[in-house]
Structures are given as structure tokens and as C-alpha cells.
Amino acid sequence: MAAAAQAELIHDVQLDYFGKQLATAGGDRRIKIYEVVNGEKSHQTAELVGHDGPVWRVAWAHPQFGNVLASCSYDRQVFVWREHSPQQWSLVHKFLGHEGSVNCISFGPREFGLRLACASSDENIAVLTYLGEHSPGQGQWTSTMIKAHKIGVNAVSWAPACSGMRLVTAGCDNLVKIWNCDESGNTWAEEATLGRADERHTDWVRDVAWAPTVDGAAEMIASCSQDKKVIIWTAGRSGEWVPKTIQMSCAVWSVSWSVTGGILAVAGGDNQVTLWRESHVGEWVQIGALEEGGGGLLPSS
């Protein structure tokens, strides 16, 4: 894919809602937008500049808000961009409230309006809310800061809308925490720190992902860590979160759920992406791996 032509290290790649546009976050401080054709070919349509450090993550908003993309960087800044006409982008909001690297961003479910959660090395989460009635550009933004994790916050993920306005975060304190918002939509509080001491990660938690909820299935959260473990947390009937651990061979950097939540992709320090699914007996088993270079799916041996 043409995205491979970006000279510097690419830290993140995200497809938009329809799979028609692809955004990359580069170590060269640039965000590049590509048009995807038949899922196989792409050509660059835009380059967004303005960050003063490596760009760690990009995130697309739901299309009901227009073609809106957010980016975050080592430079402590969060930018919100909008495509106001085909292949023409403008910076519509700049958030400067963090005092450390902004490591992760995530747009919330569209049912809650245009909200963006930001995770930073300054130990805080910021939740940005757009108060305008239309696509960003002519409305006010507000921000709420949440003191979340000692040393820093590495990742943040929203719960599905059916679970209420909730977030899960991953920290440098080895913890995974859930946060909920009151009915005003402005005040956040810690709901839970997942697991007993002997069930938790023992090193920095690098990523966390709340699974989509389909057909009343139990809520699930995946977390991964430098301790070489992936933990699948499942909500029990009495409100507790039950962990199941997948032992990996190296530090794990990223976890991502399929659209329906049935398959979990895991990316580790061995440059491999493996796919996992829960068996009929409740154990998580590897069902395959993504072939290096994007060539296809390799079945598990």
C-alpha cells in the first residue's frame, strides 16, 4: 500500500467508517490521508501538518459529524481536522491542555455527540466535547480533565453506547480502570480498578479495548502489557470483572476487536499480529495470524 512510502516510522493507521479513506500518523510529524480503492490500492490525497513532534495516534469521528479526524502527538497537542471539501482539510480545533505527551485518542459513540477522549503522560485523561449543532468549525469546545493514572496514561477506549457513558483506561501504574459520567455529561468518576492485586498486570499496560456488545452478550475488555500478557476481562452478573489471561512470548503493544467483538487481534514486540477467539468452553484460542506485509490470513498451527 502507498502508505508504506512514508519515510519515517508510522505509529498508527486508521480507516474511516466506510473504509474509503486511510489516515497515517508519522514520526515525521505528518498525517497523511490516502484514498482506498477495492481495499487493495491507495493514493495520497492530503498531507496534514502542524504538530511539533511525532504523531502517535489518529482517530476518525462517526460520519454523521462529517469527515472529521483527530490527531495527538508527543508535542502535548491534540488537533481536530475537518475535510470541508473533497481532499481539502482544515484545522478546526487545537487542544493545549495537557502537560505531557498525548499518547492515545478515541472518539466516543455518536449517541453522546462529538466527544473525544485523550490519554496523556501527564497522568490525566481529557474529554473534549463539541457544543455546536453541526460539523466542527463553528461551535465551542469544552474540556474535562480526569486524574487517572500515576506516571501516565497510555490508552483509552469508550464503552458501547448501550453501556452508558463510560471509559476504560490503561496506565503506567500497571492498572486498568473504568470511569463513568453522570447524567450532566460533565462529571466523571472512577467506577472500578479491574482485578485483585494477583490478577492484574505487573508492568505498564500498553493498550486497552472495550469490545462491541452484540445481542446482549456479556461486556468484555481486553488489555495488554509489557508483562507479556493479554487479559480478557468479562463483566459478571454481580458487577465484578472476571479475568482470563493469555500468556504471550513477548511484550504486547496493541489489542483490537473485530466489529462484532468476536475476534481479538493482538500485536506484539515480535512484529506478529495474532487472532484470538473464545472457544465453546470459555478458553481463548489462537485461530490465525496476519501474514507479514498484509498478504492474508495464516491459520494457526
Image (cartoon, helix red, strand yellow):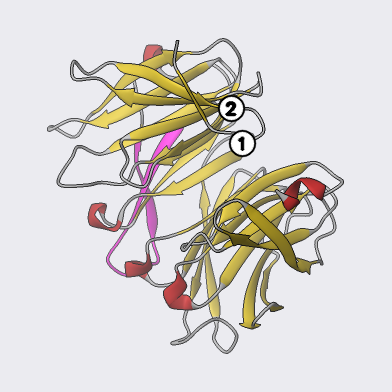
What is the CA distance from the residue labelled 1 to the residue labelled 2?
6 Å
Instruction: Name the residue at 55% across, 41% down.
Output: 155
Identify the residue shown where x is 25% and y is 46%.
213
Q: Position of residue 207 (x, y in %)?
A: 53, 35
Circle 2: residue type:
Glu
Left or right placement of residue 260 versus residue 186 in this view: left
Say which mark, if any, is on residue 291.
2
In the figure, 281 relative to 18: above or below?
A: above
User: Relative to 59, is 161 on the left or the right?
Assistant: left
Residue 141 in magenta stretch: no
x and y percentages locating residue 92 in the rendered image? 66, 79
- Is 51 in front, or is 153? 51
Q: Using the image as rendered, state which of residue 100 and residue 116 is in the foreground.
A: 116
Residue 32: horizontal and vertical position, in percent? 74, 60
Q: Is residue 211 above or below residue 59?
A: above
- Read off the magenta span: 175-192
Q: Is residue 99 visible?
A: no
Q: Quadrant of the C terminus?
A: top left
Q: Element at badge 2?
A: loop
Residue 153 as seen in the image, left or right of residue 298: right
Q: Which residue is the site of mark 1?
A: 294
In reply to whether residue 179 is colored magenta, the answer given is yes
Residue 271 image point, x, y percent:
66, 24
Q: Residues within 10 Å of mark 1 (few under 14, many from 20)?
A: few
